[in-house]
Amino acid sequence: MNFNLYSAEDFAANESFIAYYLQTDSEAVTFWQNWISLHPEKLDEIYKAELLLAKLHLQLSDMELNSAFKKFDDFIDGKKAEPIAKPRFAKKIFSYSRIAIAASLLIICSATIYLFNKTTYKEDTLTYYNGYGKTAIIVLEDGTKISLNSNSSLKYPKHFGKLKREVSLIGEGFFEVAKDKKRPFTVKTAQLQTTVLGTKFNVSAYKNVKQVTVALVEGSVAVELANKKQQTILKPNQMAWLSDASNQIETTSFDAKKITAWQTGTIIFENASFEDIAIKLYNAYGLSIINKTGNSDWKYSGNFTKTDYLSIIKNICFAKRINYEINNKTITLKP
């Protein structure tokens, strides 16, 4: 069976995957944990399938099940179906086949489609979190397009006000801001905030990375300290960061292709230390890497595009002449 061709719906209707999700079959759990670790490109579909099964972790009465079947029939016949009533949650799932049938029914309903969008609502503010091993594209109401890197979250209003446009970022994102001279667009991070009218730039502000960077590809941006004590205007191909030594904004030139390579699923290491490698692989795949080689002086270079993490680890170990040991998402490097 070729699971590489599976969509979220297929995973959610597969009895072995359901057993893995519910942790009721040790063989299924072991199989799917290994399979998922070797196929990070399917993490998006796996996540959606788990969202669907979370929705289906309920007990449907016969009336509710019959109602779902009727809505499915109406959908096939081209009739407009009424919204599905909110289900009653139960502590146990009694039948795998029952879940599979319900999954097939709910997949075509708007409630399930809503679940596939991992956006949480609180008043007029939305937060989108992007998990490990993938990127996402978000288009805001003003037409601004944002590419969001893995392990990153974007907080933004459902509707912008008349005077300004503000979003908050944790992680990394590439912004293509729609032009609006009357409403400046501001990206806020813990240390820096970037304000523009319409341009293209990359912001990297991961929690586990000390240095926050803003790299301008096109247009002009104003980069300001969070405490508003210093502001710098960037020109294209200039990058700003906050210096630990001076606590001031510093600037330099940069290679746009390398800075934005993550949008195409590319990970680049250039004379990287072990710490740099560990942080990048954690943010990309959720991996924890432990160095027990006895060597802390690393200078590793490599370029990987749409590559699973196991292949990257093998390449690093081959280059460094070391071995590795895997335990779930923890990888220990050994002599």
Image (cartoon, rainbow, N blue to C red):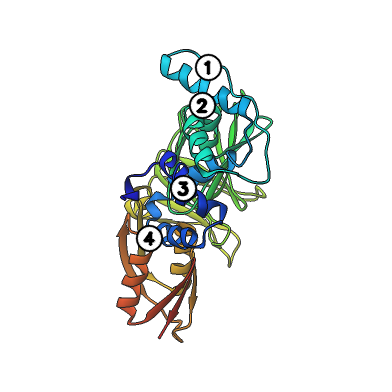
Q: Position of residue 88 (x, y in %)?
A: 68, 34
Residue 195 visible in the displayed image: no
**Residue at the image position 53 percent from the left and 39 percent from the top:** 99
First-in-chain label (2 vs 1)? 1
Observer-nearest of 37 and 277: 37
Q: Which mark is residue 168?
A: none
In this figure, which residue is indicated by the disc labeled 3?
Answer: 15
Asked if labels 3 and 2 touch by Cβ distance under 8 angstroms, the answer is no
Q: What is the spatial separation of the Cα atoms under label 3 and label 1, in whole angstroms?
A: 28 Å
Asked if labels 1 and 2 touch by Cβ distance under 8 angstroms, the answer is yes
**Residue at the image position 39 percent from the left and 49 percent from the top:** 42
Q: Quick one: SS at disc 2?
A: loop
In this figure, which residue is indicated by the disc labeled 2?
Answer: 109
First-in-chain label (4 vs 1)? 4
Q: Position of residue 275 (x, y in %)?
A: 48, 71
Q: What is the spatial separation of the Cα atoms under label 2 and label 1, in whole angstroms?
A: 9 Å
In this figure, which residue is indicated by the disc labeled 4?
Answer: 38
Three-letter code for the amino acid on which mark 2 is drawn: Cys
Three-letter code for the amino acid on which mark 1 is drawn: Ala
In this figure, which residue is indicated by the disc labeled 1?
Answer: 81
**Residue at the image position 47 percent from the left and 43 percent from the top:** 12
First-in-chain label (3 vs 1)? 3
Q: What is the spatial separation of the Cα atoms under label 2 and label 4, in whole angstroms?
A: 31 Å
Q: Is residue 200 left or right of residue 212?
A: left
Three-letter code for the amino acid on which mark 4 is drawn: Leu
Q: What is the spatial separation of the Cα atoms under label 4 and label 1, in whole angstroms?
A: 40 Å
First-in-chain label (2 vs 4)? 4
